[in-house]
Image (cartoon, rainbow, N blue to C red):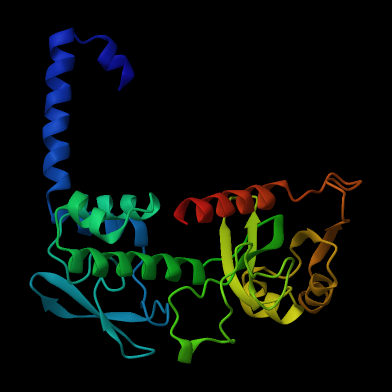
Amino acid sequence: MFIEVEKMLPDEILKTINLLQEELTKKESSKGIIDLEIHKEKGDICCPNCNSKNIKKNGKYKDRQLYKCKDCNKKFNELTNTPFHHTRLVYKQIADAYECLVNKLSIRKTANKVGISIKTAFILRFKIISCLKNIINNSNFKGILQLDEYYLPINLKGTRPENMPRISKKRQKNGTGKSGINKHTVCVVSGVDEHDNIIFKIGGTSNVSSSMIKKTIAKYVPNGSKVITDCKSSYESVAKENDWNLKQIKSKTYVDSEGNNLATINSLHLQARCSVKTQQ
């Protein structure tokens, strides 16, 4: 391709660029490109309900192939459980909405940028988040991974008195929050592997426990995996149950004798904290 470009004259290159730009505009405003994108990402068709590949064709609706799962009897098509399901938006609008989500734009700003109503922007964002959640729930860590947790304060601002989990406190000049980890902090259990697969899960309140690790992130770690954590005993009991090759970094130590560290997961936590402060 590059060899052919080198042989072209400037006006020929400009003409090619204009043709490519026209084709790009057509693709972005076409609904047909959605089917190509879904087919490319999904590959083999499987049931969105139980992930079974034991399916059969079940007629067509508006020229779209329908399928039926032989295991759970659910009916679906290629767009089921995707942001493209039951929408009249074109590919570029959905791609722009995803970009707005990544950039933390509000629903109102997303609606203005994409050119849709606030209600449609809200529904579309919900669809995108649901799809991202399904991807996380159906993924697993691979290779060497790092596990750790970080803590966020519980924000009860705007909560009605009858829904408060504790007695309301009077606002003071210097604040009323307790320092350190306590029942007013949320524990977020997190992990990252050597292929940059990332999972963040809310474990509960107070300090991390083995039960939090089991119900949040342990199911994504294959047996026998090399797992690097800090020296908390909560990870030790879970590692024994799941046959992990556990390597723990002692407190006030950045790297152990084998070169293991928690630099990647700590960097992610720093980015998450900065993101929370920016939103606040």
Residue 138 visible from this viewpoint: no
Tell me where residue 126 appears, x and y as whole percent: 32, 69
148 and 74: which one is in front? 148
> Taking 237 as reference, is 9 above or below it?
above
Residue 240 visible from this viewpoint: yes
27 and 87: which one is in front? 87
263 and 49: which one is in front? 263
Tell me where residue 135 appears, x and y as whole percent: 45, 66
> Taking 24 as reference, is 54 above or below it?
below
Quadrant in which residue 242 is drawn: bottom right
Q: Residue furthest right?
A: 257
Q: Residue furthest front?
A: 173
> Taking 105 as reference, is 124 above or below it?
below
Tell me where residue 251 appears, x and y as whole percent: 87, 55
Residue at (74%, 66%) from the top-left corner? Answer: 180
Left or right: 81 as drawn, with respect to 208 = left
Quadrant in which residue 146 is drawn: bottom right
Q: Residue furthest left?
A: 62
Tell me where residue 103 appears, x and y as whole percent: 38, 49
Residue at (43%, 76%) from the top-left corner? Answer: 158
Residue at (28%, 11%) from the top-left corner? Answer: 6
108 and 271: which one is in front? 108
Work out which quarter of the rendered image holds the N terminus and state it.
top left
Quadrant in which residue 10 is drawn: top left
Left or right: 89 as drawn, with respect to 57 = left
